[in-house]
Image (cartoon, rainbow, N blue to C red):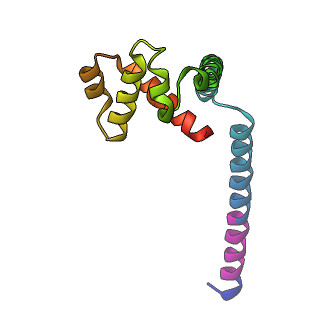
Amino acid sequence: MNLELMLGIQIVADVILCIAIVFLLVIVTKEIKKRNSGVDPAALDEFKSLIEESRRSADYLLQTLDEGRRSLKEVAYALDEKEKRLKLVTEDSPGNFPKMSSYESMTDNNDGRWKEYEQVITMAERGVETKDIAHALNITEGEINLIIGLNRKKNENS
């Protein structure tokens, strides 16, 4: 075999190989375009179900937030009402509770409750707990807290 024949065979083989590569590239490109243009129906159904579940979760979250907002408004309204009542009670307190220094002049006109009030305040200032004061004086803890709070408010205003 001569050199020219070998070169000719090599050139023909290279051309055939080049045509085969181009042919394979065309086929692969067509397959890629087919796959990209079409969507897998199973994946699409799963995607739709995920979107629907997400929408339901968002609706539930919004509903829960709305209920929480309404509850918070109700609590705020109740607190405002209680604050108004407390202000009325504390505004009336200076006329209802005498100052400690003028206790002796008021005892003639009172039924002994002022002495209990003074005892509550004295015991509280000594650090006696509310439940112990209530037990010792036979007064409810709520009344004791009210007496202490009114006394504190009176002292703040003085």
Taking the magenta stretch, the answer to whether it contains residue 10 is yes
**Pick the front one: 33 or 56:** 56
Taking the magenta stretch, the answer to whether it contains residue 153 is no
Q: Which residues are magenta?
A: 5-17
Relative to 108, residue 149 above or below: below
Q: Which residue is located at x 62 percent, y 21 percent?
A: 92
x and y percent of residue 14 in the render?
69, 71
Quadrant, the N terminus: bottom right
Main SS class of the magenta portion in the image: helix
x and y percent of residue 140 in the render?
35, 16
Q: Which residue is located at x 29 percent, y 27 percent?
A: 133
x and y percent of residue 142 in the render?
41, 19
Q: Which residue is located at x 61 percent, y 40 percent?
A: 158
Left or right, 78 with reference to 128: right
Q: Which residue is located at x 40 percent, y 16 percent?
A: 113
Left or right, 151 with reference to 52: left
**Pick the front one: 94 or 127:** 94
Write down the quadrant of residue 20 in the picture. Answer: bottom right
x and y percent of residue 100 in the render?
47, 33
Relative to 121, residue 29 above or below: below
Numbered disc total: 0
Whether residue 64 is visible, yes or no, is no
